[in-house]
Image (tube, rainbow, N blue to C red):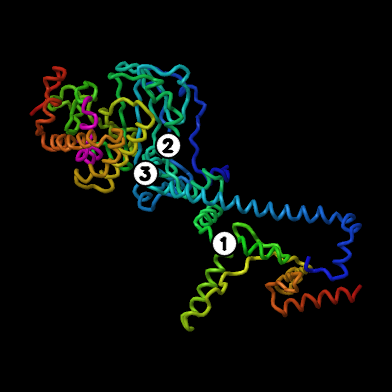
Amino acid sequence: MSNLMQIEQALLNLPQVKQGLCLTEIRSAQRAETNAQKQKFTKTIALSKLVTKAYAWFQSEEGKAVFREEGVTWTAEDFANKVFGWQKSYFSKMNKAGKLPEETIALFNAKCDEAEAAGGKPNRTLEGLHKWVKASSQGEAEESGKGEAEESGEGEGEDTTAAVEVQVPTILTFAFKAADLGLGKNVSIRVQQDGTLVSSNTDYEINMALEFLKAAIDAR
Amino acid sequence: MTTFQELKEGRKYENTGDYDRSVVQSYHRKPSALKHNVSKFAADVMGLKPIDRSKAIFKVRDEFRSKFTIGYEIEKNSFHRGAVKEYPLLQGFERDSSCGYEAVTNILPLLPEGKWRNKVYEMFVQAEQIIDSRYSPANRDCGGHVTLTCEGFTSDEMRLKLRPYAGILLALYEKRISNRFCGHNLRMQPTNENWYNGPNCYEGQGTRYQFALEKTFGYGHEAQGALEFRIVSKFDSVKQCFRRYEFFYALMDTAFNSPTSFPAFLKRIRPIVLSMYANDAAACDLRLEKAKHYQHFINTGKMHESIVSVLDPHQNHGWRHMPF
């Protein structure tokens, strides 16, 4: 783990500590959980290929002829619901994933592996994949724009893909129902483990909430 | 109270529990037809292309109604044991002296492909043991009358609209032309109200046993004109119900929404006719070629040599006369 001091790492390496904390089993279970997520994603991708293939047949002349002959008319939404039991939005994500090249999937998995090796928890899901593909293509678009202005021949081998979305643990949350007191918009703050403050409120609103908190502490 | 499920899925066609719909009645004693051409739910018309919706659906207060309706009379020699029961599709069952028995559908919406039509087809599938001849046999005495309506049109107006395209029906059901229960007034001339003694009865207009019989349902301002094509042959399968439904929608849509030339109409229906003939292109095209001659006969009274033997009065029962 990357968040350990040297003295702490030494402590956790002691046999009796390892045994008492079940560290070996914990690590094994964590690996199993990660592997299970990887396997789930792999199976999702395999399913997405089938989804794409099935939908392509549904839209083909052969498929249309069969449906016509049997007297059944389906929209795309009907197809998603009646064949897979899915809502149209999830079906669209699966169908889109099924069309992605193998190299793209492999690169995404590699990025997720990198993030895991660095101690993070990547979003190795269908949604994570699409976000990464979108971000990467935007990054490539920006890079190619730059490249046109620069001399060619440079920039080969540069990684223009985006980083995968990594779930960062939250260490502090703060919520203030300012609206109930007529003091404006509600305030919601989250501080992540890496120190990043996440909030949609302005500095003024956050400071006002903190002043309210300080006043409550002082009144104790 | 309307449930979320109903809002999402639209109208459900279910049995009423009416005992009279589940037993064979004597002739013309079956219960009244249910109006399956009405839906309170937008879900039934969503998914239709806007142009199809405008051609096939209209709204009355908070109800969606189909512009066209269709009804089938399914004549059989007998019904499969245990099959006579209530079906959402059927108005009821009754005895018929010409063939044995008949099952009559409720008033069905006649629609382009879509969610609502899927439900109509589902009703055909549910009634398979009544429709399919493997379960409920039908011989040459049995027919398959099809009754059509168009909102706002009298039966005579319907006759005038459909007459320019009806030649296809004579071609498809050529073998039924000699049948005394449907082979009269093949040129769809105006119906004579004096059924038996009118001056035009020699053309067969003075009888109900016509190729296309004008009818009226209801009374006064609620009266609805209808045209019954009696020439349609017996029903043998559920898929046949589908193909005929599609054919009659194309016929009505062309006649009332998008009139066109007869050859253009034949081009439109060719895929349906091809499916009717199990993708036998030669058989399909033969029917379409004959349809042109039959249409010419309807329009002018003149007979092409390829259809003379069919229309020749000497091959029919002596009391029916046809001018050449």
Q: Report the front residue among A159 and A52.
A: A159
Q: Which residue is mark 2?
A: B120
User: Toward which corner of the image does residue A69 lie, by quadrant?
Assistant: top left
Q: Chain of mark 3?
A: B
The three-letter amino acid code for the residue at tag 3 is Pro
Residue A97 belongs to the span the image colors magenta:
no
Q: Which residues are magenta?
A: B157-176
Q: B204 above or below A3?
A: above
Q: Residue at x 59, y 61 (%)?
A: A129
Same chain check for tags 2 and 1: no
How far from the left and from the top, in percent, is residue A25?
81, 52
The three-letter amino acid code for the residue at tag 2 is Val
Q: Report the front residue among B193 and A174.
A: A174
Q: Chain of mark 1?
A: A
How far from the left and from the top, in percent, is residue B238?
39, 30
- Look at the image and tell me in which quarter the C terminus of chain A lies: bottom right
Residue B172 belongs to the span the image colors magenta:
yes
- Look at the image and tell me in which quarter the N terminus of chain A lies: bottom right
Residue A130, labelled with which disc?
A: 1
Q: A91 above or below A179?
A: above
Gap in Å between the C-alphas at discs 3 and 1?
Answer: 38 Å
